Amino acid sequence: MMDAEGPVPLEVAMMKQMNRTPANPHIVQLIEWFSLPTEYAMVLERPHPCQNLMKFCESQGGTLMEDQARRVMLQIIEALKTCQDRGFPHRDFKPSNVLIQTDTLRVKLIDFGSGAFLKDTPYENFAGATLYSPPEWFLQKKYLAVPATVWSVGVTFFRLVCGSVPFYTEAAVIEVDLYFPNGVSTDFCHLVSWCLSQNPEDRPTLQQIMLHPWFQ
């Protein structure tokens, strides 16, 4: 891909778009990049102290309280929406691709290596983790970026609050066999169920997620 400085890797171009003014504080900042003979290297910011979100959740006993998850997920959804608005869906959203500053709970979305140009037609290659894959990928081997992102948001909601991913097999994903543990709120169950709608057209947008009663 070309920019004002000449040819750049797509991941670098994406990072530059994500970091342009006004920058989203919940997306990791690209400080510098270098072209090497057979690859490229990027220098990125790293908050301190921090962990990836999966390890942080494990350090908290495997789950987050809903209030904690609400605070974390709102930041993440804002970051994912910025990616969409700037024309580059992340395509590999999962807890391990989020850094969380452990003393403030501020988060940074990282790892744009699977990103692509946003388009209105389906993608026919899946770059993300299988456990976060939507049912349309297993059924049709294609998916649209926005509803697939929302599906991965729903899986992440469930993982953070309930302590496991909701589906472990392809068949369970296709059937959307969803069961919630005792003790989670009605609003949480409604939001996650909405995000994990089997039909992609029935899922909310990222904006609708942020306006859901669970976030109010």
Image (spheres, rainbow, N blue to C red):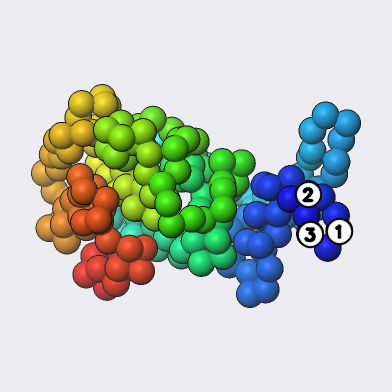
Quarter of the image for the C terminus: give it: bottom left
- Look at 79% across and 38% down and name the residue there: 40
The residue carrying pointer 1 sits among few (fewer than 14), some (14 to 19) or many (20 or more) residues within 10 Å by Cα, namely few
Q: Mark 1 points at which residue?
A: 5
Spot occupied by residue 113 in the image (x, y as percentages of width and height): 61, 41
- Among the two numbered marks 3 and 2 on one chain, the one whose residue lies closer to the N terminus: 3
Q: Mark 1 is on which residue type?
A: Glu
The part of the image, by quadrant, that contains residue 75 is bottom left
Q: How many marks?
A: 3
Q: Name the residue under label 2.
A: 8
Spot occupied by residue 22 in the image (x, y as percentages of width and height): 63, 75
Q: Name the residue under label 3.
A: 3
Toward the viewer: 159 or 149? 149
Residue 128 appears left or right of 14: left
Q: In this view, does 168 lie above or below 122?
A: above
Please report contact status of discs 3 and 2: CB closer than 8 Å, yes or no.
yes
Please report contact status of discs 1 and 3: CB closer than 8 Å, yes or no.
yes
The residue carrying pointer 2 sits among few (fewer than 14), some (14 to 19) or many (20 or more) residues within 10 Å by Cα, namely some
Label 1 – label 3 distance at C-alpha: 5 Å
Q: What element carries label 2?
A: loop
- Look at 38% across and 39% down and name the residue there: 142
Spot occupied by residue 125 in the image (x, y as percentages of width and height): 47, 35
Please report contact status of discs 2 and 1: CB closer than 8 Å, yes or no.
yes
The residue carrying pointer 3 sits among few (fewer than 14), some (14 to 19) or many (20 or more) residues within 10 Å by Cα, namely few
Q: Is residue 25 above or below residue 65?
A: below
Label 3 – label 2 distance at C-alpha: 7 Å
- Look at 87% across and 35% down and name the residue there: 36
